[in-house]
Image (tube, rainbow, N blue to C red):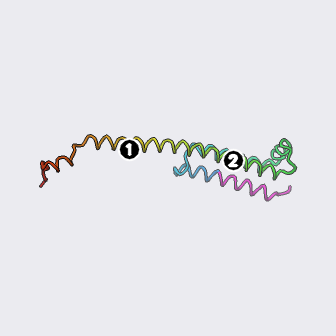
Amino acid sequence: MEIYWARILGVFLAICFLFLVFTLVRLKKLSEEYSVFWSILGVIILVLSLWKEVLIRITALLDFSLPIFTVFFLGLFLLLCLSLYFSVKLSQMQRKLNKLAQELALRNIREIDRQPDRQSDVNSGTHVEEK
């Protein structure tokens, strides 16, 4: 039985990656929303590390000459999808932040309008000093 060190390293790194994801969720450093994605990615890495045939079939399906091209292509595609996803999330957060800033500004203006006009009290001499 041949030992493939790359395969063993892949399995080890996938298990470490999954452990890291679960630890970050447990410590509340990673939200559950993102942990699903990263867990699926860890499982995919584990499957591809354990069963080389799956990677070879995907390579043939995509009509690439080498499995490493498939890995790089899928990695690049994943990064592109992540970039798009985080751009959408950033845009949503920016809209929410603008809305909150506008609401806060309106609330401050309303509070200023509700307060008595202190400048006119000072000018008319009716200002009372507190002891």
Outermost residue to the front: 123
Q: Position of residue 4 (x, y in %)?
A: 82, 57
Q: Amino acid at mark 1?
A: Ala
Q: Secondary structure at mark 2?
A: helix
Quadrant in which residue 115 is drawn: top left
Does the magenta portion include 8? yes
Question: Quadrant location of the N terminus?
Answer: bottom right
Closer to the observer: label 1 or label 2? 1
Q: Secondary structure at mark 1?
A: helix
Does the magenta portion include 101? no
> Badge 2: few (under 14), some or many (20 or more) residues near its Cα, within 10 Å?
few
> Badge 1: few (under 14), some or many (20 or more) residues near its Cα, within 10 Å?
few
Q: Position of residue 108 (x, y in %)?
A: 33, 44
How many marks are shown on the rendered structure?
A: 2
Cα separation between marks 1 and 2: 37 Å
Q: Residue at position x 86%, y 51% from top?
A: 66
- The front one of 82 and 42 is 82
Q: Which mark is residue 80?
A: 2
Outermost residue to the right: 65
- The front one of 93 and 68 is 93
Is 119 left or right of 51, judged from the image as shown? left
Q: Residue at position x 56%, y 44% from top?
A: 91
Residue denoted by label 1: 105
Outermost residue to the bottom: 5
Q: Amino acid at mark 2?
A: Leu
Q: Which mark is residue 26?
A: none
Is 34 left or right of 7, judged from the image as shown? left
Q: Residue at position x 54%, y 41% from top?
A: 92
